[in-house]
Amino acid sequence: MNIELKLQALVDGELDAREVREVEALLARDEFASLLVQELKWTKSAVRHSEAGVALPETREFFWSKVERGIAAEARNQAAPAASVAPAWWTKLLFPASGLAAMVAVLFVMSGPRSSSDDALNENVAEDINAYSFHSEAEKMSVVYVSDENADFSPVGQEVKNETEAEK
Amino acid sequence: MAKPLDHKTATDVELVAASQAGDMVAFEELVARHRDKIYARAFSMMRNEEEAIDLAQEAWVKAWQRLKQFQGDSSFATWMTRIVINLCLDQLRRQKRTRAESIEQLDEELGGVERQMPVVASNPTEGLERAELRKRIDKAMVQLSYEHRTVLILHEFEEMEYKQIAKVMNCSIGTVMSRLFYARRRLASLLQSLKKEQQS
């Protein structure tokens, strides 16, 4: 600690007995140190006695209403994250359920080839009667082909809005 | 059956206990009793009325939230003052980060400037009325950086020891001593200039 800070520590009563004796011995022989201590004491005393009695420039009621609103807002802020942090019981099932759904989707894709274009579905209704149906969701249309003895397919029914001719 | 608390005549200790149990009326009474002191401390540190009001308000909100942590080791007023001082320091640190440092401030941080100042040989506040003394100190304090002003406020107004100030300001005791020394020397010099201005 340099000597100036020791002089200040003396003014503030922050030195132990041995240090006080040392600094006082210095003050007895060093005029600059004495003047500096005097200046530090004046400033310390002036500041200590100058604390202004500043009053809050708002009425009791108005200030309290702001504090009260602040308390209420903080309570809401603390309650909101707490609610979102605690998950609903069903959210715990989301991970296993989504995993299961993914597995089902993969198995479905791997289970066999499907010929399709657009969202149309071609289906061989029954191979032994040589009938063939065509259904398109996009076109809202179903067509059934039946083969003759020459195995020539021709449409025998056509309907819109997913109704087959046979159902009519 | 327990006697109902008369908030107007109750002691701070009784009001704190009631507030800790959720009595908002008791807390309102504490706010009414200490609001000026808390605002004054915020104002002395911030030197800005609006900021001081906002920080005083924030301090009371924080106090309500932390009331259960108050064990009564110090007085309620001291505990509240610590809260507002910490809020002011946080705010001043944020402001400092966004503000360019002046060359003088850098000098202050590095130290040494105070040693070049001549010693003030006559008391610059001698014979001043209290109101005038306050006015001059106030004028001089504005010209100090927040670190120097804060260290003075904590030491002279809050009567904290060096180690307590170091803890509050999150710095070493050596830094506290240097800042306090610089702040006092600069203040003495500013007060002397104000005295000369007044005389001329």
Image: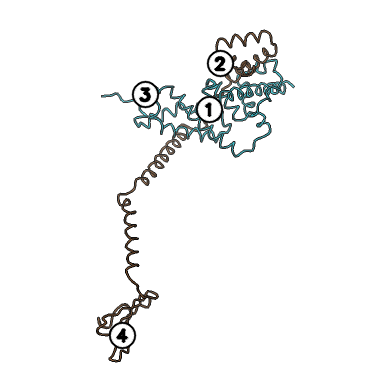
Circle 1 residues within 10 Å: few <14, some 14–19, many ≥20: many
Using the image, determine if residue A97 lies above or below residue A152. above
Q: Chain of mark 3?
A: B
Q: Earlier in the sequence, mark 2 or mark 4?
A: 2
Quickly name the residue at label 3.
B14
**Is residue B134 or residue A114 the one in the foreground?**
A114
Q: Secondary structure at mark 3?
A: helix
Which chain identifier belongs to the brown chain?
A
Disc sitting over residue A14 in the figure:
2
**SS category of the residue bearing label 1:** helix
Cα separation between marks 2 and 3: 36 Å
Which color was chain B given?
A: cyan
Residue at horizontal 36 percent and vertical 29 percent from the top: B20
Question: Do the residues at pointers 4 and 1 share their chain?
Answer: no
Q: Are marks 3 and 4 on the same chain?
A: no
The answer to whether marks 2 and 3 sit on the same chain is: no
Amino acid type indicated by mark 3: Glu
Q: Are marks 3 and 1 on the same chain?
A: yes
Q: CA distance from mark 4 to mark 1?
A: 93 Å
Give the secondary structure at mark 4: strand
Foreground tag (2 vs 3): 2
Q: Is residue A74 left or right of residue B192?
A: left
Using the numbered discs, state the Cα–Cα distance from disc 3 to disc 4 in whole angstroms.
94 Å
Q: Nearer the viewer, mark 2 or mark 4?
A: 4
Rendered position, B91 above or below A96: above
3 or 1: tag closer to the N-terminus:
3
